[in-house]
């Protein structure tokens, strides 16, 4: 008994230590089956779960529930995955084997139990790692460990957002400290004008891929610096440049300490662009070549991805901050202050121009890309100043459209359906359009029923969350009516995003009378589930949020417009799996890509979106719904008015009639046709496997080849 108990515990611990479980719901099911209450109590964290139970107890539960063979099976599958001799990567990425891709990102969204992401950028980076792992591409991730994560969102009685922070307990996370060869903790130091900044390093296994996280909470740092990596996007410019110093320069130094010499530097957004400079410093030191030559060499294997056309999304630092933090560094490289500043200036001569991280990255990368076709048009216009002798169309910024890591987002139920109806190995073949043609053969009733079950699960989840808030606020009315809030027979619209103003999360509320008419329609009503956070310092965003909360307490809309607090990976997963329609109303062309809508496709939801970002490429007239025709207007009010009008037209004339057009047994055949068209036309394109393969084929492999050519 004792031995087998230890054995079982060991197997579960091995599973818990590799984030591979995060995209294998059958492993998560093991934990939820073992103890559903505990699973919820530990916030879906398998390590914390195991730390709270003793082996004997688990053994007993596993026996009672006959879980042994499932646990063994999961354990075996993980090992097979890790040891697979043949992957896409082994077949195609030979020259990255010894010199992997170093993928830098300020945030990584892998699972709700590891809250080191704030939104789309982080989720995308997490999805990138997972697909790189699935494909077997040699890649190592570098990021920061935020020990207070992003914030926890609560809405008070007035509907105003309040933020709180909880310290992560590192012992409860699958993080291993990185050590030096003598067993001492690896500490990275970066010198600044007023002392050094130190960080310890953790590693996390994400399938076959390793993620290294720097953490400034170490002895030797001032109290303030110990808090430096506590929160995402907190503090001021000084906090920001110090975080980026750690991420870029510190991150590149961790690689050196690990003896990892990257064949490709992939900078996911400009935050990490200082990594270029540290790589240059190393080469100047090792090879004794000039700064300029080393910079050109590093550029040969640097890839830069820009993620936003919103100017505030591009970090800019004044000369004093730059001198304070990089003065020591530039002296080592024997650069003058002006020469250094010029690296981050559009116009090197302009002494008033701040140092821009995006400029540093754009000037010194082999290839730069935006994250959708329309975003690359905007980016070329935005950065044309860097290439004054070229026309806008010749500015070298291409695009690779983002995709989502399907197994992280698709409901287990849908996964099974595809397994039986498409191909047993559909997950490894999802980028091939031909397997999706078989979707057309799935019985309408079967597909519809599957989706309805997911819709019901979403409603139950939302009710639990609403109940939690109502209990906290002592809102008796909601508590009593909880089972009457939302209705599985009603068209469910989901809308969740950061409450940045350009996302216009409240566009649908801009025609109140029309909205009431639609929501309260006796025959064909609709209901809306909102979620999303506003940045702690964004009062405009918080006001939008408050307006939504006020609507949700309007007597006529009450049980049909709801807001779910604390949008995170978990809330997102429930929403994208259960909604009928995913609503996205950004102000064109500011969305860059947007990925949340991609997550609903394979779960049987339909997109209703402005033709911006990925939807501008994905929409074909039959696979969802468009708001407007892709128009823009210089006057924002006019654009908002028009888009609101288009949104209502789409709802009134297309979405609602189609959803409620049923046959005798209640199946909306024409709606289901559209769902199938959506799966078939979008599934193979807008996934992270396709995205990462595009990066590998178009960027990584040529870059790795160029670099080795340059060194021989
Ligand atoms: C997918 C996702 C995002 C990105 O969504 P967009 O609004 O489409 O950019 C943000 N946050 C969470 C939690 C997500 O899951």
Image (cartoon, rainbow, N blue to C red):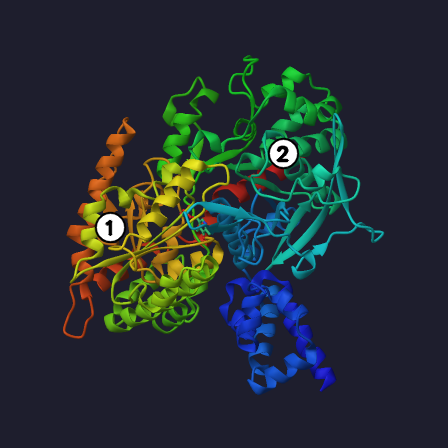
Whether residue 204 sits left or right of residue 350 in the image: it is right
Quadrant of the image containing the C terminus: top right
Q: Residue at x 24, y 50 (%)?
A: 625
Check residue 239 in the rendering and tell me which mark sits there, or answer none.
2
In-front residue for pair 559/667: 559
Q: Secondary structure at mark 2?
A: helix
Disc 2 crowd rating (10 Å Cα; few below 14, some 14-19, many 20+) is some
Quadrant of the image containing the N terminus: bottom right
The percent coordinates of residue 513 (x first, y second) are 19, 46
Displayed quadrant of residue 526: bottom left
Whether residue 175 sits left or right of residue 415 in the image: it is right
Q: Secondary structure at mark 1?
A: strand
Disc 1 crowd rating (10 Å Cα; few below 14, some 14-19, many 20+) is many
Q: Residue at x 68, y 43 (%)?
A: 261
| Residue 372 visible in the snapshot | no
Task: Determine whether label 2 and label 1 are within 8 Å by CB.
Answer: no
The percent coordinates of residue 385 (x first, y second) are 45, 20
Give me the C-alpha separation between circle 2 and circle 1. Answer: 43 Å
Q: Is residue 485 above or below residue 148?
A: below
Q: Is residue 479 above or below residue 243?
A: below
In-front residue for pair 98/538: 538
The percent coordinates of residue 426 (x first, y second) are 41, 66
Residue occupied by mark 1: 625
The percent coordinates of residue 271 (x first, y second) are 57, 36
Q: Residue at x 18, y 63 (%)?
A: 660
């Amino acid at each position: 008994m004792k031995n087998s108990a230890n054995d079982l515990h060991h197997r579960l611990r091995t599973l818990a230590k590799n984030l591979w479980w995060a995209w294998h719901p059958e492993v998560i099911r093991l934990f939820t089956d073992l103890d559903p209450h505990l699973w919820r109590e530990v916030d879906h964290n398998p390590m914390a779960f195991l730390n709270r139970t003793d082996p004997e107890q688990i053994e007993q539960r596993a026996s009672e529930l006959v879980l042994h063979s499932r646990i063994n099976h999961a354990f075996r599958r993980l090992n097979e995955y890790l040891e697979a001799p043949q992957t896409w990567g082994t077949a195609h990425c030979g020259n990255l084997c010894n010199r992997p891709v170093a993928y830098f990102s300020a945030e990584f969204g892998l699972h709700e139990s590891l809250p080191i992401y704030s939104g789309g950028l982080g989720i995308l980076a997490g999805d990138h790692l997972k697909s790189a792992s699935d494909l077997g591409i040699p890649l190592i991730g570098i990021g920061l460990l935020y020990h207070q994560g992003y914030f926890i969102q609560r809405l008070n009685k007035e509907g105003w957002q309040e933020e709180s922070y909880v310290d992560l307990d590192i012992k409860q996370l699958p993080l291993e400290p990185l050590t030096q060869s003598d067993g001492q903790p690896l500490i990275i130091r970066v010198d600044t004008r007023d002392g050094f900044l130190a960080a310890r390093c953790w590693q996390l296994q994400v399938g076959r891929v390793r993620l290294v996280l720097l953490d400034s909470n170490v002895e030797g740092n001032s109290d303030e610096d110990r808090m430096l990596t506590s929160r995402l996007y907190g503090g001021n410019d000084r906090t920001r440049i110090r975080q980026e110093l750690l991420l870029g320069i510190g991150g590149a130094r961790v690689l050196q300490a690990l003896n990892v010499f990257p064949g490709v530097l992939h900078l996911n957004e400009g935050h990490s662009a200082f990594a270029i400079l540290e790589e240059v410093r190393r080469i100047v030191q090792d090879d004794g070549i000039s700064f300029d030559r080393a910079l050109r060499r590093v550029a040969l294997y640097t890839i830069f991805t820009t993620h936003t056309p919103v100017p505030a999304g591009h970090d800019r630092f004044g000369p004093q901050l730059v001198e304070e933090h990089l003065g020591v560094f530039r002296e080592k490289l024997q650069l003058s202050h002006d020469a250094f500043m010029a690296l981050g200036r559009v116009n090197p001569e302009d002494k008033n121009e701040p140092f821009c991280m995006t400029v540093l990255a754009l000037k010194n990368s082999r290839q730069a890309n935006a994250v959708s076709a329309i975003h690359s048009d905007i980016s070329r216009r935005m950065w044309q100043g860097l290439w004054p002798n070229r026309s806008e169309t010749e500015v070298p910024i291409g695009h690779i459209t983002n995709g989502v890591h399907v197994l992280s987002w698709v409901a287990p139920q849908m996964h099974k359906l595809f397994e039986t109806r498409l191909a047993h190995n559909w997950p490894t073949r999802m980028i091939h359009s031909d397997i999706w043609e078989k979707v057309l053969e799935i019985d309408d009733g079967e597909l519809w029923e599957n989706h309805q079950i997911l819709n019901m699960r979403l409603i139950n989840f939302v009710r639990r969350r609403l109940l939690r808030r109502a209990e906290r606020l002592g809102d008796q009315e909601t508590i009593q009516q909880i089972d009457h809030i939302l209705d599985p027979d009603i068209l469910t619209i989901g809308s969740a995003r950061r409450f940045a103003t350009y996302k216009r999360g409240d566009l649908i509320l801009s025609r109140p009378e029309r909205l009431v008419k639609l929501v309260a329609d006796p025959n064909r009503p609709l209901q809306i589930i909102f979620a999303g956070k506003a940045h702690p310092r964004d009062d405009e965003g918080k006001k939008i949020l408050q307006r939504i909360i006020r609507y949700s307490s309007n007597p006529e809309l009450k049980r049909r417009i709801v807001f779910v607090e604390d949008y995170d990976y978990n809330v997102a997963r429930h929403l994208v799996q259960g909604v009928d329609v995913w609503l996205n109303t950004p102000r064109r062309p500011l969305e860059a890509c947007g990925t949340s809508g991609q997550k609903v496709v394979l779960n049987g939801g339909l997109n209703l979106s402005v033709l911006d970002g990925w939807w501008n490429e994905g929409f074909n007239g039959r696979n969802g719904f468009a708001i407007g025709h892709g128009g823009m207007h210089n006057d924002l009010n006019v654009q908002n008015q028009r888009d609101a009008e288009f949104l209502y037209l789409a709802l009134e004339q297309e979405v609602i009639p189609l959803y409620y057009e049923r046959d005798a047994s209640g199946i909306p055949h024409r709606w289901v046709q559209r769902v199938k068209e959506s799966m078939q036309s979008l599934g193979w394109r807008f996934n992270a496997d396709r995205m990462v393969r595009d990066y590998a084929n178009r960027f990584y492999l040529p870059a790795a080849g160029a670099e080795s050519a340059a060194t021989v």
